[in-house]
Amino acid sequence: MTSVKTSSGIEQHRQAPRAWRYFERALGLGTAGVLSVMMALTGADVIARYVLNAPIKGAFELTEILLVCLVFLAMPLAMLSQSHVEVELWEPKSRLGKALRILLGGAAALLVFGGLAWQLIDHAARLARYGSVSNSLAIPLNLVAWVAAIGCAIGALVALRHILKSLKDLS
């Protein structure tokens, strides 16, 4: 827990940064878990298919579903660590220009990820109403859409965090 002294000398404890770090760690562990399950499933399916001549039923379908979950959970992690691919069309020289570039990029990301989350929530609700399930394993597809929507919503929150940090750097 970090503490900050206010102008009156009273220490205030800040929980948000620590909570955010725990959230980031949990998201990373969840993403690593999905990737581990995908690797184990693929390895087991290859062994079962070629050694035992008995492939795992629905392995391909489950791998597809896990891949969707992996992509949408890993996107916010890449944004958090700022390790995603960026194209800088404008390299400002001043601190104000750099903050403005981050602000504009963050606003674009917020709009895109917020819009995707909104559309995916609507899509998940429709899939639930229709009772859509996967072909082999009958996994409810609305759950996959919800994972994607949550990943996009987290991405929008990360973009908002970058915007707020950029505004703080401006002042």
Image (cartoon, rainbow, N blue to C red):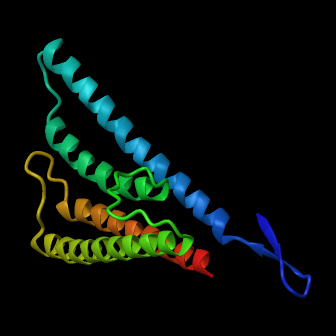
Q: Is residue 154 visible?
A: yes
The extreme right residue here reads 9
In this picture, residue 121 sits left or right of residue 99: left
Quarter holding residue 121: bottom left
Q: Percent position (x, y) of residue 4?
A: 81, 73
Q: Percent position (x, y) of residue 75?
A: 36, 56
Quarter holding residue 141: bottom left
Residue at screen point 37% across, 77% down: 107
Residue 18 vertical placement versus 64 (above, below): below
**Observer-nearest residue: 156 or 48?**
156
Residue at screen point 33% across, 66% down: 152
Residue 156 vertical placement versus 25 (above, below): below
Residue at screen point 53% across, 70% down: 94
**Observer-nearest residue: 55 or 118?**
118
The extreme top residue here reads 51
**Observer-nearest residue: 124 or 86?**
86
Residue 47 vertical placement versus 162 (above, below): above
